[in-house]
Amino acid sequence: MGIKKILFCVTVVFVKFASYSYYVRSQECSLAQFYSPQVLDTLRQNIKDANAVIGKTAPGLPTWLGETSSASGGGAEGISDRFVAGFM
């Protein structure tokens, strides 16, 4: 179920929307993704997309970036726990 459908169904009970974002999936990422401008710019686009949906379905609803991290699923072994992950 997409964010638009969820917000449409339950906008009345929301007092704020918390967004979560991960740059890559730990199971299928590479070291190069951790410093790629295209990958790093995905957070900005994810925020814009969420704000656009919220603006249409629940105008004025406060939004929070509740969590962000380099890689989902506990991180990428040997990459997420290194200096390069600081770019994310």
Image: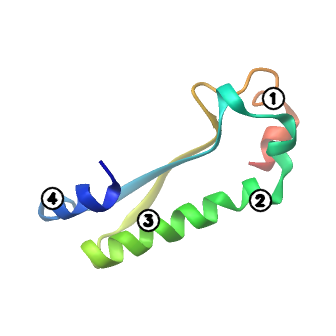
* Label 1 Cα neighbours within 10 Å, binned few <14 / some 14-19 / many ≥20: some
* Dot 3 or dot 1, earlier in sequence: 3
User: Residue at the spot x=57%, y=26% of the render?
Assistant: 73
Mark 3: amino acid: Ala
- In the drawing, what numbered circle is on residue 38? 2
- In the drawing, what numbered circle is on residue 56? none
Mark 2: amino acid: Gln
- In three-dimensional space, the C-alpha distance between marks 4 and 2, rounded to whole angstroms, equals 33 Å
At numbered mark 2, what does the secondary structure look like: helix, strand or loop? helix
* Dot 3 or dot 4, earlier in sequence: 4
- In three-dimensional space, the C-alpha distance between marks 3 and 2, rounded to whole angstroms, equals 19 Å
- Does residue 48 appear in the picture of this structure? yes
Nearer the observer: mark 3 or 2; the answer is 2
User: On the image, numbered disc 1 is attached to which residue?
Assistant: 79
Mark 1: amino acid: Ile
User: Residue at the spot x=34%, y=69% of the render?
Assistant: 62
User: On the image, numbered disc 4 is attached to which residue?
Assistant: 9
Mark 4: amino acid: Cys
User: Residue at the spot x=21%, y=59% of the render?
Assistant: 14
